Image (spheres, helix red, strand yellow):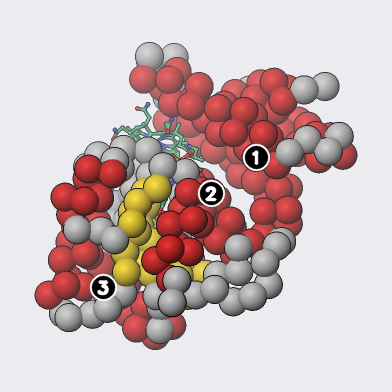
Amino acid sequence: MSIQDIYDAVVEFSIDKVVAKVNAEIANKTEVSEILRNGLIAAMDEVGQRYSEGEFFVPEMLMAAKAMKAGLEVLKPLLSQGDSDKKGTIVIGTVKGDLHDIGKNLVAMMMEGAGFEVYDLGVDVDTEKFLATAKEKNADVICMSALLTTTMPSMEVTVKAIREQGLSYKTMVGGAPVSEDFAKKIGADGWSTDAPGAVETARKLTAK
Ligand code: B1M
């Protein structure tokens, strides 16, 4: 039994096996970060690689995503337990035109675990929805995730709208194609390459 079994189960699209193997690693006291990084996330990178090489197609990406999500559900109670002091209010979503939600879900779970109040708007979220929810919930930070190079520009639309409307929400961007240079270029307040880093950045952005 090893982390490699989790990786293999995702690449084989076996939901039952992923759930069983993740539970086994938890029972084995393996670090959650290790299960995530070397098991579930590494397997999705492999799936993306196989898609790029023409070995997998969209249905295979979808099946792997379902297997990964099943594994994340098992980990969720461990990711969301932690600091109970309220830190700040976060509105998070995957940007307009983009349906990838696994990384965004992970960021949301870890932020909840860190004590933030998190409003997750799901996928395909436009600027109006981000701003309307931020106003309604009196948010501190609007967090935007994008996995497609074609959807990254809508992050800039939201950042610009905040500036033009004279609003004070901080913004954070992330997702595989999003770089620190891009974040700076569009005027976002924060950026992170992964979920733990997103929590750190949110802490800095909400520090009083
Ligand atoms: Co898509 N897809 N996909 N896909 N898919 C990618 C992203 C791709 C890189 C695959 C490839 O070509 N190798 C490619 C994008 C190319 C590009 O634009 N550069 C791609 C493509 C092309 C497409 C379609 C266009 C395919 C098609 O239809 N022809 C299509 C687009 C649909 C749409 O969105 N409109 C599509 C569809 C899909 C599925 C629906 C089948 C499925 C998504 C299911 C779902 O999410 N519910 C899917 C999947 C699964 C992938 C890959 C294989 C895996 C993504 C994933 O979940 N990774 C992906 C290849 C890859 O990334 N290696 C691929 C695991 C996840 C934990 O990582 O989301 O990166 P990630 O999140 C990370 C960090 O980025 C960060 O934290 C997380 C880790 O801790 N992070 C943040 C994320 N958000 C953050 C926000 C933050 C901070 C950090 O602050 C706010």
Q: What residue do we see at 68% from left, 35% from top?
A: 35
Disc 1 marks which amino acid?
Answer: Ser
How far is the residue under mark 3 from the one under mark 1? 35 Å
Q: What residue do we see at 37% from left, 38% from top?
A: 176
> Which element is circle 2 on?
helix
Q: Are marks 2 and 1 in contact (CB under 8 Å)?
A: yes
Disc 3 marks which amino acid?
Answer: Glu
Going from the N terminus, do you reach mark 3 or mark 1 first?
1
Q: Residues within 10 Å of mark 2 (few under 14, many from 20)?
A: some
Name the quadrant containing residue 28.
top right
Mark 3 or 1, closer to the camera: 1
Q: Is residue 169 left or right of residue 75?
A: left
Query: Residue 33 shows which numbered tag?
Result: 1
Going from the N terminus, do you reach mark 3 or mark 2 first?
3
Going from the N terminus, do you reach mark 2 or mark 1 first?
1
**Quadrant into which the C terminus falls:** bottom left
Q: Which residue is mark 2?
A: 196
Q: Are marks 3 and 1 in contact (CB under 8 Å)?
A: no
> Which element is circle 1 on?
helix
Disc 2 marks which amino acid?
Answer: Pro
| Quadrant of the image where one finds ligand 1 | top left
The residue carrying mark 2 has its beta carbon less than 8 Å from ligand 1? yes
Q: Is residue 179 left or right of residue 194?
A: left
Name the quadrant containing residue 32.
top right
Q: Residues within 10 Å of mark 3 (few under 14, many from 20)?
A: few
Q: Which residue is mark 3?
A: 128
Q: What residue do we see at 21% from left, 64% from top?
A: 159
Query: Residue 146 shows which numbered tag?
Result: none
**Quadrant into which the N terminus falls:** top right
Residue 134 percent location from the top left of the image: 36, 77
Furthest residue in direction front, as rendered = 208
Furthest residue in direction left, as rendered = 164
